[in-house]
Image (cartoon, rainbow, N blue to C red):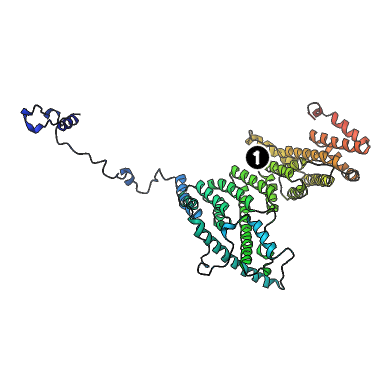
Amino acid sequence: LLSDVASFASSLGFSAAAGDSSGFNDSDFRRAGPIKTKLTSLSPPTKNPPAKKFDGKRPKRSVGVGNRERVIRSKTEPDRIGPVEEPDDDRFKNLPDLPLVKHGSLGVWHRDATELEEKIIGKDKSIEYSRIEEWKSFVETKKEFGQRLLAQYVRDYWSSRGQHNDIKMLVSSLKSGTAADKVSAMSVLIGDNPLANLRSIDSLSGMVTSKIGKRHAFAAFQSLQEIFLILLPDRKLKALYQRPLNHLPENKEGYSLLLFWYWEESLKDRYERFVSALEEASVDTVTDLKNLSLKTTYVLLKNKSEQERRLLSLLVNKLGDPENKVASNADYHLTNLLSEHPNMKAVVIDEVDNFLFRPHLGPQAKYHAVNFLSQIRLSHKGDGPKVAKRLVDIYFALFKVLVSEASLSPSVEKNDKRRRETSNETHSNAKGASPSEMDSRLLSSILTGVNRAFPYLHSDEADDVVQAQTPLLFQMVHSKNFNVGVQALMLLDKISSKNQIVSDRFYRALYSKLVLPSAMISSK
């Protein structure tokens, strides 16, 4: 404080060197000893002294697994999501340019390709070749020529369109933006011209298949879903060997059509990789990522026909997921799929049929599959009776498999009892149904499905079912589970009323159930 007052007095002209005649003496305000100038603020910050004392024996607290993972991700992201100004292949840079369609005239690519094909080739031209080896060699030659055309197209696009300010801003986001900015920039570039930005699709695919981190996969999955919904036509994609390449003329229109065909094959390859990424994500340990893959699979399967067999198999396989929530989501998406496309009932039922009779399939997976089949909407019109007959056959075939498995292992009940006792001792608070309870739920679900499908059968088919399956139904009536027996009695009553046949065996089975103690407490 004294030093500050002294400096202020000096600024007003009260100098201490003027002596006593000046009227002011600042000796009382001066600090004892020399006044040192503080230069710490002007000097660069020094290293933390404790950091020099570490000798490698003790790990630093600031470097952990999470920090190390963030460093690795930050180093790998720019290379994986990098700029896309240049084409992949530099072999064709020194070759002369060929007459080709301009990038500014591109509309919807598959419509432009169809119009161009009808103009220069027509609809009646087919593939002509004498030997398969010659055709393969010819296709490879055309494929390499298509790579040259695409490289020229990309180079022309970036030399003209790349000079615009909006494209420059997107490229800047690709180089120095965040991961979300890069995903958005690549999506906009693909929307601007998909033919010239094939590498952006590759970069997004690299994000969903990366093993370094999964945080970018969520945004990349959603972006690729929207991109493929726009790019894919309403037909299945074709490869080059499926095209009449021998009818292409060597002019601007022929080169342009070959460019479209080569790009379609490239898009088909990228979409297959994306479906493979969905399959890998569906078995991931992160539940949210599995659910996202199921939702993406459902949306693609509902809107596009490309790779529909693999996508449908993926959805059906998740009925056997060990997590009930994921299996229920697969059931939900399959039900919505049949609501949107009722004509797919036969295809979906066949896929579930193949899933049900796989070896070593657990009862929980079978229960989810049967529960889905029992919820399929049926009708008396069209192929409704055929679908109902197919479902009834699956139900009874599955019941025979369950009966045969039980008969082949007579010690299952003892082992089940011992397993339950051990489970009660060690895991008294564990959730989930025991194997016997799951079998009872499965049998009840089978009978529910039969009850729902039986009224939609033709009369002659219903008679065949009655003659063939009545012994099995009476066998199910005498099941240890009361609810299963009631379901079997309900089906037998429905069969008897429809065919006007009431047997004494039915009433004996009914009275045997009524005298059981379970009849007094059951809600059935």
| Crowd tier of the residue under label 1, counting other residues whose Cα lies within 10 Å: few below 14, some 14–19, many 20 or above | few
Find residue 132 and report its image quarter. Answer: bottom right
- Expressed as whole percent of the image width and height from the top left, the position of residue 523 reads 78, 28
Quarter holding the N terminus is top left
Left or right: residue 523 compared with residue 172: right
Left or right: residue 396 compared with residue 140: right
For the question of whether residue 279 can be seen, the reply is no
Q: Camera-side residue: 496 or 2?
A: 2
- Expressed as whole percent of the image width and height from the top left, the position of residue 383 reads 83, 47
SS for tag 1?
Answer: helix
Residue depicted at 77% across the width and 42% down the height = 376
For the question of whether residue 297 can be seen, the reply is yes
Quarter holding the C terminus is top right
| Residue bearing mark 1 | 325
Three-letter code for the amino acid on which mark 1 is drawn: Lys
Left or right: residue 76 compared with residue 26: right
Find residue 117 and report its image quarter. Answer: bottom right
Q: Camera-side residue: 113 or 275?
A: 113
Q: Camera-side residue: 458 or 396?
A: 458
- Expressed as whole percent of the image width and height from the top left, the position of residue 418 reads 70, 39
Q: Camera-side residue: 440 or 124?
A: 124
Question: Is 494 rendered above or below residue 257?
Answer: above
Find residue 497 and report its image quarter. Answer: top right
